[in-house]
Amino acid sequence: MISFVQILDFIGTFAFAISGIRMASAKRFDWFGAYVVGFATAIGGGTIRDLLLGVTPVWMTDPMYLCCTAVALLCVIVFDRRLVRMDITFFIFDTIGLALFTVVGVGKSVELGFPFWVAIIMGSLTGAAGGVIRDVLINEIPLIFRKEIYAVACVVGGLTYWLCSLVSLEPYACQIVGGSAVFVTRILAVKYRISLPILGRSDDDPPTER
Amino acid sequence: MISFVQILDFIGTFAFAISGIRMASAKRFDWFGAYVVGFATAIGGGTIRDLLLGVTPVWMTDPMYLCCTAVALLCVIVFDRRLVRMDITFFIFDTIGLALFTVVGVGKSVELGFPFWVAIIMGSLTGAAGGVIRDVLINEIPLIFRKEIYAVACVVGGLTYWLCSLVSLEPYACQIVGGSAVFVTRILAVKYRISLPILGRSDDDPPTER
Amino acid sequence: MISFVQILDFIGTFAFAISGIRMASAKRFDWFGAYVVGFATAIGGGTIRDLLLGVTPVWMTDPMYLCCTAVALLCVIVFDRRLVRMDITFFIFDTIGLALFTVVGVGKSVELGFPFWVAIIMGSLTGAAGGVIRDVLINEIPLIFRKEIYAVACVVGGLTYWLCSLVSLEPYACQIVGGSAVFVTRILAVKYRISLPILGRSDDDPPTER
């Protein structure tokens, strides 16, 4: 039987793999390099989470993650010209992946008996760390540190999950509400161009007047 | 009760978080990105150490590391203009952090039954790996590989710790002497501009004469 | 007694350490930085493998890895002018290291009871991840994602290992045949300039005609 959490995981994996493969494509990586970057984007966050939690990384227990990334690579190879016109679709996909990974990460940490503040960090890592690994591998400054609300949406989702659990909602309900909070937070932030303040002084720039 | 080692850990965390947040600020990261870089700088070395030693990373057992980084971020946001005039203060802070983290790392590894040559590496990782992670995240070549005596001071401190333990000093005394060795080595190296030889031939440069 | 696998490991360690140290030298790192990059190149893949497999990294159980990297550093310092004329020798060395590390990684994973598809990934990580870590540390886009058949040779070797084990060859025989497959694949790929297709459209470039 395929569980609800597994289905969520696979959808998220596909969306994240596509994101990694497209970034690798922009840097003109070969197929193998693109596959590796896509795979690392998809499973990177979960792998760091599982290493920190002290359990075997989930992709080592189920070959579906590898296969899912292979399908994503095939899609990019075959449909790439058409994919570039679908940026909004991919934005939605990516946000679904973010939401799903976050609640999977929070849920797993809570199940393993970690306190909620650890679980919220683990959820955020599951959602956002794959993108950081992707950006390190393609030698760019991680996007999420400079642009938009992204990982913050994971934190909002994790806190929402925690609040739901405080009022004794079922785990499934917590995951749905928490995931929706991630999704809505990111969509609203992008729609209304909400972002966090930049750290650093504008007077870092050399003065133009004497 | 707060132990001696915990106090050392918190001072080091604060100093390292400030260092990461200031570097992120120079790259114009947003508040969240700066917080993540500060946190990764502070706990990165200890996390790698704990993963290698096979124990739960220490920051996952105590929310004080998160809080300490939040205080550091707040300080940078509020006092930043004044902080830039305090470079020497931060150099001292950073060196204290380096010394403290090194001896904490050596001590923990020895307690877990690892031999001293592993403990010295773990101490150096605890002290210096956070800075490497910080530089990878902000997409710079790690500073410690090219400039000054930094990680080498950790190695000196670790060896000193080991010598102290060979002559049967108490763990506390080993930590104080070892930490002082790190501190003094770095201060002297910077004061007298002592650095390691650069690897690579000067005749790499194209000859200017015919 | 020194086992066959240990000898393979040490030869591979030396070759990979040389590769890391020479790249660090090109970036004008100091001796310590070059040592760290060489060490990370040599043990990085095996360390990631061991963390994923949940066992203590092998270099923490045997100081020979540290010593081997020190010898490599010494060789580069003393013989560097002569080493640069030996690029083909180093290409052979590096390929031997790749082959050896791959089969060591596959063998260890199988021994620990992981399925073969995990073992093939672990073999490829052992062979190729050190080079990725090296390139991240020197702030370059990882070479293996863009150039030549490299990590793909590990996958070919891992699959060959698996086929050998399917027909019930002894582990030693599997390692020799699998390692040879890695070696031959890479040598042939470089000799005949075989590479994987690049992902990404050539019409990414702005059109030059109106």
Image (cartoon, coloured by chain):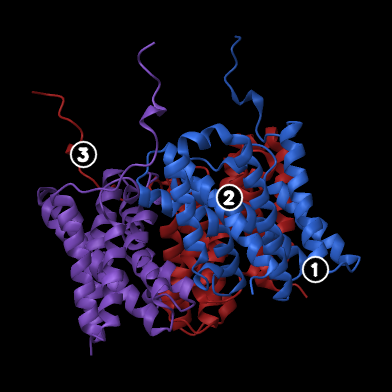
Chain colours: A blue, B red, C purple
Vertical order, B167 against C137 (above or below):
below
Residue pictured at 13% horizontal, 55% vertical: C79
Instruction: Name the residue nearer the viewer: A57 or C25.
Output: A57
Vertical order, B45 against A135 (above or below):
below
Q: Where is residue C71? Give x, y as percent.
A: 22, 66
Picture quadrant where residue A49 is located? bottom right
Q: Is residue C88 visible?
A: yes
What residue is pinned by disc 1? A171
**Horizontal side, residue C194 vs residue B95: left or right:** left
- In the rendering, which numbered label is found on residue B202? 3
On the same chain, marks 2 and 3? The answer is no
User: Of helix, strand and loop, which one carries label 2?
Assistant: helix
Q: Is residue B180 visible?
A: no
User: Of helix, strand and loop, which one carries label 3?
Assistant: helix
- Going by the numbered disc 3, the residue's amino acid type is Ser
**Horizontal side, residue A170 vs residue B131: left or right:** right
Q: Are marks 2 and 1 in contact (CB under 8 Å)?
A: no
Q: Where is residue B74? Give x, y as percent.
A: 75, 44
